[in-house]
Amino acid sequence: MPGIPAVASIVLPDGRVVTGYAINPVQPEPLAAKPAAVSRTAVNVALGGIGFLAVCGGLLLLTSFIAALTAFITQLITLAAVVFGGWIAVQIFSASGHRGGTTVNIRKAVIKRNHFHS
């Protein structure tokens, strides 16, 4: 019969006989071909490119931040100059009048031969 395997007998070294069906070994399924290994150089170049892009983005943000900070500091200095200049202008052009200070009148004096003539 074609569907039934043949019976096999084996004699062991100690003289015993073992009878049973012959079993064909199971053939493993063929493995799929592995993809070609990627070279380490290609991986390093790719990682370097990703790192470079990350650094460029960070540098772009850093330069934008520095430009904004510079503009802010410039505006603060300009504001301080305007406020301080306005305060000085108010001090100079305020209503004239003496505020209790000492008044000194200076007249034209003539000095002749080590003598003071007023």
Image (cartoon, rainbow, N blue to C red):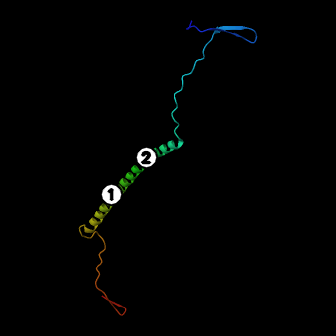
Residue under label 2? 53
The circle drawn on residue 75 is 1
Who's the residue at 27% across and 66% down the image?
A: 89
When asked about the image quadrant of residue 8, the answer is top right
Q: Nearer the viewer, residue 107 or 48?
A: 48
Who's the residue at 34% across and 60% down the image?
A: 77
Ranked by sequence position, the earlier of labels 2 and 1 is: 2
Question: Is residue 117 placed above or below 60 in the rendered structure?
Answer: below
Placement of the N terminus among the 4 image quadrants: top right
Residues at marks 2 and 1, CA–CA distance in whole angstroms = 33 Å
When asked about the image quadrant of residue 107, the answer is bottom left
Label 2 with label 1: CB-CB less than 8 Å: no
Residue at the far bottom in the pictured view = 113
Q: Position of residue 18 (x, y in %)?
A: 69, 8
Placement of the C terminus among the 4 image quadrants: bottom left
Badge 1, how many Cα within 10 Å: few under 14, some, many 20+?
Answer: few
Q: Nearer the viewer, residue 58 or 1?
A: 1
Question: Is residue 108 placed above or below 8 in the rendered structure?
Answer: below
Q: Position of residue 11 (x, y in %)?
A: 72, 10
